[in-house]
Amino acid sequence: MLTIGRLARYAGVTIKTIRVYHAKGLLAEPDRDASGYRRYTARDAVELIKIRTLAEAGVPLARIRELRTDPGIDLRKALHDVDGELTARIRELRRTQRRLRRLAEGDDLLPEGVGDHLGRLREYGFSERWVTLQADLWVLVFATHPETAAELMGDQAQILAEPALRQIFLDYDRAYDLDPGDPFVRELADRAVRATRERYGSGELPGQDITSDIPGLIQSTVNEASPAWRRIDALIRRQIG
Amino acid sequence: MLTIGRLARYAGVTIKTIRVYHAKGLLAEPDRDASGYRRYTARDAVELIKIRTLAEAGVPLARIRELRTDPGIDLRKALHDVDGELTARIRELRRTQRRLRRLAEGDDLLPEGVGDHLGRLREYGFSERWVTLQADLWVLVFATHPETAAELMGDQAQILAEPALRQIFLDYDRAYDLDPGDPFVRELADRAVRATRERYGSGELPGQDITSDIPGLIQSTVNEASPAWRRIDALIRRQIG
DNA sequence: GTGCGACCCTGACCCTGGGGCAGGGTCAAA
DNA sequence: TTTGACCCTGCCCCAGGGTCAGGGTCGCAC
């Protein structure tokens, strides 16, 4: 016969934890001795150890109670599910650890390539507003998708190196304070559509599948800055989808 | 410029989480627009992602705030510590997973060997009280130290197979309701000490170092049942330590 | 211009898995 | 008989959010 303290030390938990499990109906209240102390048997210890195993695996206490009391439950399958979640959690923790290490080593999440790229934008004649916006966006992209960011930026640099394509972006920049109904806006959207078709054909646009949410974020962030830009985006989207 | 919702989706958290981080001083409150909405920059997104990385690594929010605001802190070392804890946690989870699998496969934590052993005790003439006590103890040992339990039980079976040694345990069993001052008690303790010395010399007793807490638990559980048994244990302990 | 759905604001309460304390009773050994 | 270690119940506290209420705001469409 064990006292609660001994049982607790034995199972590696605190007394309070055992009392909580009683209160929640996880572990049956044992008999009491003459002075009201709980007296446990070795079976209780085994039960407690099973409960702790599930709890340490991250199963909520309420769920553990179900598993142990509800007879119409497929215990085998439930345990298998728990096992799978545990595996997923371990994988997640390892990913976190990798991110943590990157954070510890290179505190500058911005590779120097970005600075160069922004400098070139200025040389091309983009407005300071545009450059700032681009800086923000690349910071974001590098922070969230460090693997593909460099590649995307290289692609972008290549596009801007071609004068015809660059002009489209320069006009885009300049359209900032235009009225959304201005014919120049519509014309610019058409030119952008034509250039896109020419560059990528009717195939996949780059980054669409790879990085999933980046383009959407970039575009809507850009859009917020100007009604004319919003209009251009809507027009392009209507034609390319 | 990002709204709180966009930032949240972006970092993979809820809006509420971001507001909590503001309230706790983890993430600076950004400027508001004309209607009172928070407007974020890409830098905020980067900060948030760093915070989440630490939070997912299990660092308490209060500690994260310290790390990010207190300049007199060795960030490098702190991150290294976090990394170590993370490794430990992953190891723990894997241990839990192993226990879980054992729990899923063999639901009977009691190998059949135990039943045989208990049957033999009855044949030897041990009291039902003794058999029950032994059953509880072996359940406990198998539940907590499955690796060494079988070995320990084999050892015990071997001891009981020798009539002279078995007689000591039978007398122990019978001493249950004796007065602790009865001379038979003292004599029994002396016999037990002699037998132990004979069997193990002055070297290590088995299980003492290997299983650490098992013998203590067994002995004190046994002791609780009878004052005479307590006395015997005290006498033996005095001579062997 | 008006309606609509999606967003945002603050404040307040709810939840889990225990920790910790108060105020009091109990046990075993010296 | 005292002492130190246990045990009892009841109560409030914590982190890290989730959820709801009650109200204001966007941008787009018709």
Image (cartoon, coloured by chain):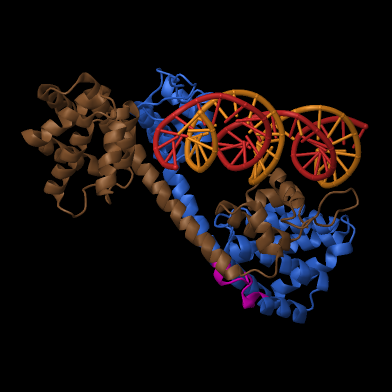
Chain colours: A brown, B blue, C orange, D red
Q: Residue at x 18, y 37 (%)?
A: A153
Q: Is residue B153 magenta?
A: no
Give the quarter of the figure containing the N terminus of chain B.
Answer: top left
Position above or below: B40 against A208: above
Q: Residue furthest bottom?
A: B123
Q: Is residue D2 left or right of residue C15?
A: right
Residue B57 at x, y percent in the picture: 44, 40
Q: Residue at x 10, y 25 (%)?
A: A124
Q: Quadrant of residue A135?
A: top left
Q: Is residue A126 left or right of residue B84?
A: left
| Residue A52 in view of the camera | yes
Q: Is residue B104 magenta?
A: yes
Q: Residue at x 52, y 56 (%)?
A: B96
Q: Residue at x 21, y 19 (%)?
A: A128
Q: Quadrant of residue B222?
A: bottom right
- Between B220 and B124, the residue placed more toward the observer is B220
- Between B189 and A60, the residue placed more toward the observer is A60
- Between A219 and A66, the residue placed more toward the observer is A219
Magenta part of the chain: B102-114
Figure label count:
0
Q: Is residue A10 left or right of residue A29?
A: left
Position above or below: B110 against A54: below
Residue B148 at x, y percent in the picture: 55, 64
Q: Quadrant of residue A216?
A: top left
Residue A77 at x, y percent in the picture: 56, 68
- Between C12 and B138, the residue placed more toward the observer is C12
Position above or below: B57 against A45: above
Residue B80 at x, y percent in the picture: 38, 34
| Residue A111 in view of the camera | no
